[in-house]
């Protein structure tokens, strides 16, 4: 897996690109994914809209970037915000992540901007009974 410290630096660098003029809550996500046998990282930020329902979460923004790059599967998810405590992916993002991250023990790491608080989980713990048509 790619270097965790480099991913944390990338999260910190990209957090400022968040478009969050309404809530002030900046969020950046990084997904480690595989395409053609090579591990890569894609970053995404939350993009708020005055009509909140049109807001795009950072996790889905990162997934979109990776899909364009030929992503085959997500290996790990990282989420950072400017809040004092780490925030968790919302329910919609949890479901979207499961579309590409099928391994129930795949790691999910959430951190605050100061990198002094974090919590780790797995996909299976975040969404134990995902919606599925199969």
Image (cartoon, grey):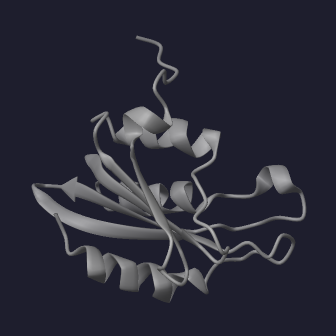
Q: Which residue corresponds to the image point at 57% horizontal and 51% vertical from the top-left? A: 89
Number of on-image labels? 0
In the rendered image, residue 79, in percent from the top left (x then y), is placed at 49, 64
Does residue 33 appear anywhere in the picture? yes
Outermost residue to the front: 116
Tell me the quadrant of the picture where the C terminus can be found.
Answer: top left
**Residue 130, image x, y percentages:** 49, 24
**Position in image of residue 104 (x %, y %):** 31, 33
Above or below — where is 65 with respect to 11?
above
| Farthest residue, direction top | 134
Residue at (27, 56) in percent of width and height: 33
**Left or right of 63 on screen, residue 112:** right
Q: Nearer the viewer, residue 54 or 117?
A: 117
Query: Is residue 14 toward the left or the right of residue 83 in the image?
Result: left
Q: Is residue 33 above or below residue 122?
A: below
Q: How far across and down, in percent of the image, does residue 8 sit?
A: 38, 79
Can see residue 110? no
Q: Is residue 66 left or right of residue 61?
A: left
The N terminus: image quadrant = bottom left
Question: Which of the 4 image quadrants contains residue 30?
Answer: bottom left
Horizontal placement of 103 versus 65: left or right? left
**x 62%, y 39%: residue:** 91
């Amino acid at each position: 897996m790619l270097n965790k410290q480099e991913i944390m630096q990338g999260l910190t660098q990209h957090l400022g690109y968040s478009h969050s003029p309404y809530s002030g809550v900046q969020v950046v996500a990084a997904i480690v994914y595989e395409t053609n046998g090579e591990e890569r990282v894609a970053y995404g930020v939350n993009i708020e809209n005055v009509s909140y329902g049109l807001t795009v979460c950072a996790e889905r923004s990162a997934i979109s970037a990776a899909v364009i790059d030929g992503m085959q599967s997500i290996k790990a998810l990282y989420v950072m915000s400017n809040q004092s405590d780490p925030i968790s992916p919302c329910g919609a993002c949890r479901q979207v992540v499961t579309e590409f991250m099928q391994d129930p023990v795949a790691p999910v790491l959430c951190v605050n901007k100061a990198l002094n608080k974090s919590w780790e989980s797995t996909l299976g713990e975040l969404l134990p009974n995902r919606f599925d048509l199969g």
